[in-house]
Structure formats: structure tokens, C-alpha cells
Amino acid sequence: MTEEYYPRIVGLLCNWCTYAGADLAGTTRIKYPQNIRPIRIPCSGRVSPHFILTSLLSGADGVFIGGCHPADCHYNEGNYYARRRFSVLKSFLDFVGVEPERLTLEWVSASEGDRFAEVVTAFTEDVKALGRPNPYSRKELED
Amino acid sequence: MRKIGVFVCHCGTNISSMVDIDRVIESATRLPDVACAVDYQFTCSAPGQTQIKDAIKEYNLDGVVVAACSPRMHEPTFRKTLRDAGLNPYMMEMANLREHTSWVALNRGEATAKAIDLVRMKVAKVARLRPLEEIHLPVTRRALVIGGGVAGIQAALDIADGGVDVTLVERSPSLGGHMAQYDKTFPTLDCASCILTPKMVEVASHPNITLLTYSEVEEVTGFVGAYKVKARIRARSVDLEKCNGCGTCLEVCPVRVPSEFDASLADRTAIYRPFPQAVPAAPAIDRESCIYFKTGKCRACEKVCPADAIDFEQENEIVEVQVGAIVVATGFHFFDARKYTEYGYGSYKDVISWLQFERLTNASGPTGGKLRRPSDGMEPKSIVFIHCVGSRDPSKGFPYCSRICCMATAKHAVITRSKIPDAKIYSFYIDIRAAGKGYEEFVRRAIEQEDVQFIKGRPSRIVQSDGKLLVRSEDAFLGRQIEVEADMVILTNGAAAQNDAAELAQMLGIGYDQYGFFNELHPKLRPVETNKAGIYLAGMCQGPKDIPESVAQASASASKVLGLLSRDQIAREPIIAEVDPGRCTGCMDCMEVCFFTAVEEDEFMERKIAKVLPGVCQGCGACVAQCSDGAMELRAFSDEQIHAEITALFAVEVAR
């Protein structure tokens, strides 16, 4: 275990705000850690709790959900559903013994490339600080 | 087993400088469903697309991964490539190796590892894609234009001239916007009214335009080709049909309140017409200042009206319009110069804003176009202009450049010279920005021919003493403090987004930036489209710009609208939700979460199930995440496809 811990983070990014914000971070050449693997989804309201569980079970060290700021959702209220499901799932993770800090939900708009880089950097640091997930808790999730 | 082609783009060196393309290809080749993996310098170019088409035929591909830029950039391009090659356009996914990888990575190793992962994830998704057919929907051949300034006017006229009906909604009692308040326009010194008012008349008389003034858009629902708009026509208290615009009522009204149009330099009556050339000419009663509405007595205007047009009982009216497309041209407002307390705007009468200066030099303004200072009516002999009030100043105003102020100040200085030939004119600037046809020449004319002293420096304070204003500033070229005595100071305050811009953006579902300016879809290639299909932008609401640019953008929006509405049907992406009747238990949770009421009850084998209306569903997927039976799926973003992406990420351990 001499190799440096390199956490892998699944990013579920809504097409209209956060995915576009991540694009803007690119066009403006803002650098940030590359641990995140973005998956494009139409809306944060599309995020099924299963996606998060699948990610953690398959070996993700963290899951980052990105949506539009409250009141700015392209589909009007998808981000509110995301927020509700997110808070329930967080307490569920806590219940089964997975650190809830491995999951985050951030609002990043299409014009906030710098903010995308900031929140991803911060989350990557947080996940690094948590260290490798406890294999027993993963076992717990499977059950 | 699928036969997937992977096409990795170098994007010149944009991707290849940070990503080891050979390793990406090598790793993709080893994936089970991949039939071929090749690279090219510019995959989006004609030879790059030909490479894809040839490979589709040669390897009989049934799916494609393009590893290049953001799908928000070139997804439509490559879908078309697939269609041209006879493959269903929805059998393609893009791995974002540029915006999400090469441009943001700290080192080549990290970027390459991410690129390899992203390609593998997309291959896994493409292996589970299904061919989709576009949905065709009818189009309502009418457009809505929000805002009746020069941009809205131009857009409405261009659309109407193209034979499409337009509804133009303007918040104030008259068309015209800010441009109607200006005296002259740079750099030609065209009289603003002379070029604008004929257009206003044209709008009002155009057979294809329905003009709603003193009105606001209250609700917008629906989608491209079929928007439903509710507009509130505020009670004008004057019958537009009966009023002949004679203006007798204006003479008898006893009320005086500051005139918005004259930037508070003059008063107006409670029944008022913002300016004499207003369109429509019929005045409106401002109910908040009208004596009758406050006390129940007066009705002086009613007594003198020869057309019996005054109607105190008139009520707000809601009208509903169906439109296929919308142009947003809601303009801007001027930055509030009171935030610069050191300049004393609001307390020193002779420190005025740019807009007030426009009114003071305008022939229809409060002084009849004579340049007189507000405090005592004296002709100012020493005049100071201060640039960038609120612009390029993140501490008090905005970090951006308002773009129009340098030229406007040069124009003001030239107008001042023509009105007061012996005046001393000073212009304090940070930098002069005069990019535009004839602009630099105009500024040079102000400096060289009109004897305007341009001083590089931002004034630190204005003090009033003995009826004079002392402007203290640095002179950056001389490197020392200077003090200029002025009779009048004009603050060139910058442009800000409308205060309620965010509310409108949220109502329409379009994006906006941190200042409240609306976002275009792509800054270079799609400058007037928004992230909502069928909604376009024109003028200052998208960002600071001058009149020629606003007009150009308005015409661009109009041509987009005409292009869209020239078709009988529009094709919509088939990315919508669908129900598996066998698994649906009819709990209707999906209906609960659907904002668009795209889900309704249906029957299947004598039991209740949910049904998605294809023309209404917007494809957000909220219902899919809500369904506890796994009966709802979102095409192109199904559970199976997204799970495949996630698990593919962790399927291989890549050495880092």
C-alpha cells in the first residue's frame, strides 16, 4: 500500500447546468483534480438512488451529483426531487455504515465554471481525507 | 455482440497535447464490443466525418463512440454523420475528452487515465442503446416578442415582414425603450428619434403585429412550437380604441410627479404619455399618483376628453396567446450611481447621470435641448465626464465593461462642444474602448477637433464649494494628483441587467449569469439561441452591447424564428419517458412528479397503468427515478444504460 490513494468519483451531472458548467471550466482552462468521471444525465431529478448505491458497490470512493440552482431547473422542479432523495439517501448511508460524506449534491449553473472546479476540488479533498471505503460497509450495502 | 466504432479526435492539439491518444485507442481496441478504434486530427471536419461513415460501412458498425469535445458542442453534428451513413442517429455517444479532460487536467497521466475510463464507459452505454425515431409535432405559426425597445421592435418587424404573426408585449405605456430617451447616436450623430420613431409607428400599424403595451408576460408554459403565454394587460384607464391622442387631458391634470422618461429632471402628470412621440399616443393613468384613485374625487381629465375615452373602471385583463417561438428583448437598466457616494450623485444637483444628460440635450427634453445645469439653469462652462461608474469595478459595481460608455461619452463631449463652443470639457477615463466601425475615428475627432481633454485617471472625490464642483483625481500620465473645477459633472454609469431578469429567466426556463444577463447557447456559434428550444435573445438582456449590435441580434433572432416557423412540423428529440405496461402497477407516482402533466392514466389488460404523452414529455426523467416498480424508462438515459456506464468505470483496474 505504498501507492498514493487515488479515489475515484462518479459524477452525475445535469445536462443544463452542471454539465455545462463543467464545459465552461474547460473552455476557460480552469484546472482541477481529475478523479471525477462525469456521466451526463438530463436532470438531477433523474438520479435514481440506485445509481449511487451501484457506484458505491462497484468501487466508487465518492458520488457527486450536480444540478441547477433552486428555481433555475430547466424542468422547473427536478432539482427539488433530487434534493429530497439525496437527504433520505444520506441518512440511509449513515444507517448502513457508509460515511455520508462520500455523497454530495451541489448546485452549479452553466455560467459557473470556476465554481464547478472549486466544488469538485473540495469534494475530492474530502473523499481523500476519508480514505478507502471500509470493505465491511460495502458488504453491508450488498445485504 | 455489438459492433462499435470508437473515433478519437486530437482536436488539433487541444486533446492530444494532454491525452495519450495511442493509449486510448489501444485500450478501446481491447474492449469486447469494439470493432474498430481509430483517431483523426479533427473528427468533426469533412474528412473526419468521412472516416466515420467509411468505418460504419466497412465494419458494419451498429454503434459509435466519438471521443472528442462536449456533446453540447457537436452531438448534432455526429448524429447527422450517422444518419448520412444510414445508421440510426441515436446509436452514438460522445466521450468528453476536451472540456472535461484535456483542458482541465493538471498532468498528462491523469488526463489519459480519465480519457480511457470515459471511452470505456461510453462503449458500455452504446452497447445498450436502442435506435430511436424523432417525434414530429405541429407548429403554431405565431411569435411572441418580449420588450419593445429597439431590439424588440426590430425583431417584431422582421418576423412580421416574413409573414408570421407577432405579439409584442411591452411593460411601459409606450414602445421605444432607452433609445427613445437618447438625443443622438454614436458615431454618426444620427438623431435617435428620427431613426426610431418611424419604426415604432410601423410596429403599431403592421397588419401582422398585435401590440400590447402597459402589459407584462405572466406565465409561459409549453415547449418549442407550442408555447402558451399568459399576458397581463394593465388597466390603462384610457380606451385605446376611442382615444385620439389629442392630449387635452394632460393639460388639466393637477398632479405632478417626477417623469421616468426625463430621468426625474422634469415632472409629468398622473395621466401621462411618456413622451410626445409615444406609440400608442393614448396616455395612461398612473393609478398610484392619480387623485381620483387616491381620494375618489377629481376626474378632471374625464370632463375635458372630447372622445369619451377615459375609463376609470377599466380592469387588468389577462390574455392568452399560443406561439411557436419567443424572442426575449427586455433590455437593461442603468447602474445606480448613488453607490459611489464620493461623487455625490443624488445630493449634488449638478452631478448627473448619463441618461439625464441625454434628456438635457434632447430637443424634446425638459430644457428644449438647451444644455443648462439643473441647480440654477446656468449654462455650464466647465464640464467633466467620468467614465466607468459601476463598470470595471468589482468593489462597487460590476467587473465587466459596459461597452457603450466610452463611445457615449465621446458623443456627449462632441454634442457639448456644438452647444457651448467655449466650454472646457474634461473626460476622465481608465482606458478608451472604441472597437467598431468608425468608433476610433470618432474618439479621435473628439480629442483632436473638438478640444476635449481626455485625462487617464479615476476621480477619487467630488466636493462642492461656492457653487462649483471640485473633481479630484489622479492623472496617470503625469503621475500626480490634479483638481478640476466644474460647473457640471456627468457620471457615465454602466449597464446592468434588469432587476427582475432572474424571475423572467426562471419563468421561461432559460439560463442566466451571475449578473442577470441571459445566457446564449454558445458564445460563438449560437449567439441568439438559448438552452430552451424556440426561445431566442436580442439586445442588452443578453449582455452589454450598442444599438447596431442589438439590431443585428434582433434580426438574427427573427431569422431563427422564421426558419423554425417555416416548417409545418418540427422534429423533436425522441428522448422521452416510456412505460413498460407489464411492470406498471398503476400507482401513478409518476403522474405526481411530472411537472409537464405528460403522464395520464391508461388501461392495459383491464388494469390501470400510466401512459406517457410523447408530444408533451420533456425527457427530464423525474418519473423514472420515482417509479418503484422499474416500469418507467427514459430513452437514451435508461437505468440499464446509466448502470452500465457506472459499472464499466470500475470494470478494469487501470494502472496509474
Image (cartoon, coloured by chain):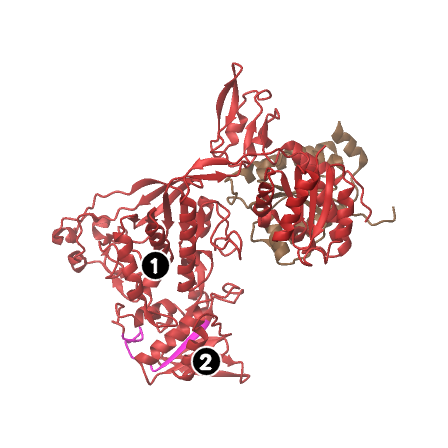
Q: Nearer the viewer, residue B612 or B249?
A: B612
Residue at numbered disc 1: B177
Residue B258 appears in view: no
Helix, strand or loop at mark 1: loop
Chain identity for the colour brown used in the image: A
Query: Where does residue A141 sit, x and y in percent of width and height?
Result: 74, 31
Left or right: residue B242 versus residue B226 is left
The quadrant holding residue B448 is bottom left
Q: Nearer the viewer, residue B161 or B218?
A: B161
User: Where the C terminus of chain A falls, by quadrant?
Assistant: top right
Left or right: residue B37 versus residue B88 is right
User: Tell me, what hue is chain B?
Assistant: red
Write the residue at 35% across / 74% down.
B350
Write the residue at 50% across / 65% down.
B396
Write the residue at 48% across / 39% down.
B571
Give the letter of the chain under mark 2.
B
Name which residue type carries label 1: Gly
Q: Nearer the viewer, residue B532 or B269?
A: B532
Give the letter of the chain under mark 1.
B
Left or right: residue B147 versus residue B34 is left
Residue at numbered disc 2: B454
Q: Provide the residue span drawn in magenta.
A: B370-387
Left or right: residue B433 versus residue B23 is left
